[in-house]
Image (spheres, rainbow, N blue to C red):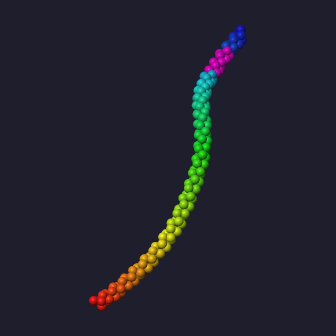
Amino acid sequence: MHEYEEVMNRLIIENEKSKESCNGVMVDLRRERDQALDDLQSVETAFSDLHKRYEKCKSVVDAYRKNEETLKSCMLDYQEKLVKNDEKYKSFKQMAEQKINLANAEIDKVKKSSDSEIKVLQIAIRKLEMKAEGLQKSIEQKTLENTELTAICDELLSKAK
């Protein structure tokens, strides 16, 4: 019986040791469970934050894409307008150059005609000056002849008296 008691005591001690070790294992498992739950909560929070950031980035990327498309269409419109304005500028420039060339040709024509008119008028002035000189000489000669005739008439009158 004594052996029986010893065996029972051993079994009780082993049972208590096993309970203590089970309690220790249980405490460790609870600690691990709590740690795992905390880690799970942290992972879920991090995932939630990551998902929010992802959604925010996704909306920002969509906005950038829309802006890019808008900017590309505006750029194409402005490029078309630039090409059209370049063509208009070139046509206006060509038209202005043609008008300038016509005006320069007209100016040259007027200068040549005025130069020839000036030469004609200078020749006419020279002719008139020569005619005036000739008439002046003729007047002087007539005056001289009149003076001589008057002197002859006076002499004849004085002799006739």
- Judge left or right: residue 119 versus residue 68: left
**Residue 24 appearing in the image:** no
Segment colored magenta: 14-30
In this picture, is 131 found above or below 67? Answer: below
Q: Is residue 21 magenta?
A: yes
Secondary structure predominantly adopted by residues drawn in magenta = helix
Residue under the image location 62 percent in, 25 percent down: 40
Residue under the image location 65 percent in, 16 percent down: 19
Residue 127 placement (x, y as % from top left): 47, 75
Residue under the image location 61 percent in, 23 percent down: 37
Closest to the observer, 39 or 60? 60
Q: Quadrant of residue 30?
A: top right
Q: Quadrant of residue 155?
A: bottom left
Quarter of the rendering occupied by the N terminus = top right
In this picture, is 98 found above or below 136? Answer: above
Closest to the observer, 35 or 65? 65
Which residue appears farthest toward the left when viewing the image? 161
Residue 87 placement (x, y as % from top left): 60, 48
**Residue 5 appearing in the image:** yes
Residue 71 placement (x, y as % from top left): 59, 39
Q: Is residue 79 magenta?
A: no
Which residue appears farthest toward the front when viewing the image? 160
Quarter of the rendering occupied by the C terminus = bottom left
Which residue appears farthest toward the bottom when viewing the image? 159
In this picture, is 13 found above or below 156? Answer: above
Residue under the image location 53 percent in, 65 percent down: 113
Closest to the observer, 49 or 58? 58
In this picture, is 138 found above or below 28? Answer: below
Residue 29 placement (x, y as % from top left): 64, 21
- Judge left or right: residue 76 versus residue 122: right
Closest to the observer, 104 or 125? 125
